[in-house]
Image: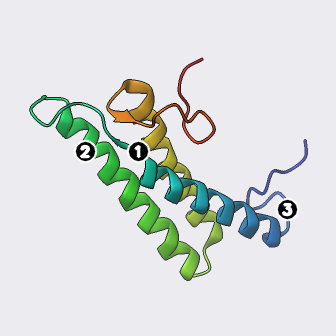
Amino acid sequence: MTGEGIPGDGAPSEDLARRLQRYLEITTRALTLVRVAPPERSFLHRGGQDMLDMARTYLEDARHFRARGDLARALAAVSYAHGWIDAGVRLGLLDGGDNDEIFTQFS
């Protein structure tokens, strides 16, 4: 089995850094496009807002870890950030429009 940039599998750190940069850019863009779907008066609005808050927090963590040179933790954090966004879009708590390149919409 070949490595995919996971620490400890022998993959060069340059590959990990490129992959991290790519995911940081995608997730940052996703946060500019997505919005809370349920109306403010809906009980579900707060759930969507919580998902956005979690995504933003994990993205901040990713940037912090990258600045410290901890690329593995940075990649994990940005993956969690995008996971929160994707989950919110799939559940209908977040609206990603029709963009199925950045968001996991429907199967």
The answer to which of marks 3 and 2 sits earlier in the sequence is 3
Estimate how packed mark 2 is, as few (under 14), some (14 to 19) or many (20 or more) residues with alpha carbons within 10 Å.
some
Viewer-side label of 3, 1: 1
Distance in Å between CA atoms under marks 3 and 1: 33 Å
In the rendered image, the vertical position of residue 72 relative to residue 76, given as above or below: below
User: Farthest residue toward the bottom?
Assistant: 68
Tell me the SS state at disc 1.
loop
Q: Amino acid at mark 2?
A: Gln
Q: Which mark is residue 87?
A: none
Query: Of callouts 1 and 2, which one flags the residue occurring earlier in the amino acid sequence?
Result: 1
Residue 46: % across, % down: 18, 39
Q: Which residue is label 3 attached to?
A: 11
Could you tell me which secondary element the residue under label 3 belongs to?
A: loop
For the residues marked 1 and 2, what is the alpha-carbon distance in whole angstroms?
Answer: 11 Å
Q: Position of residue 76 (x, y in %)?
A: 57, 56
Q: Quadrant of residue 24?
A: bottom right
CB-based contact (under 8 Å), mark 3 and mark 2:
no
Which residue is label 2 attached to? 49
Q: Position of residue 12 (x, y in %)?
A: 85, 68
User: Which mark identifies residue 34?
Assistant: 1
Q: Nearer the viewer, mark 3 or mark 2?
A: 2
Q: What amino acid is labelled 3 in the image?
A: Ala
Q: Quadrant of the C terminus?
A: top right
Residue sitting nearer the eye, 62 or 88: 88
Figure quadrant of residue 90? top left
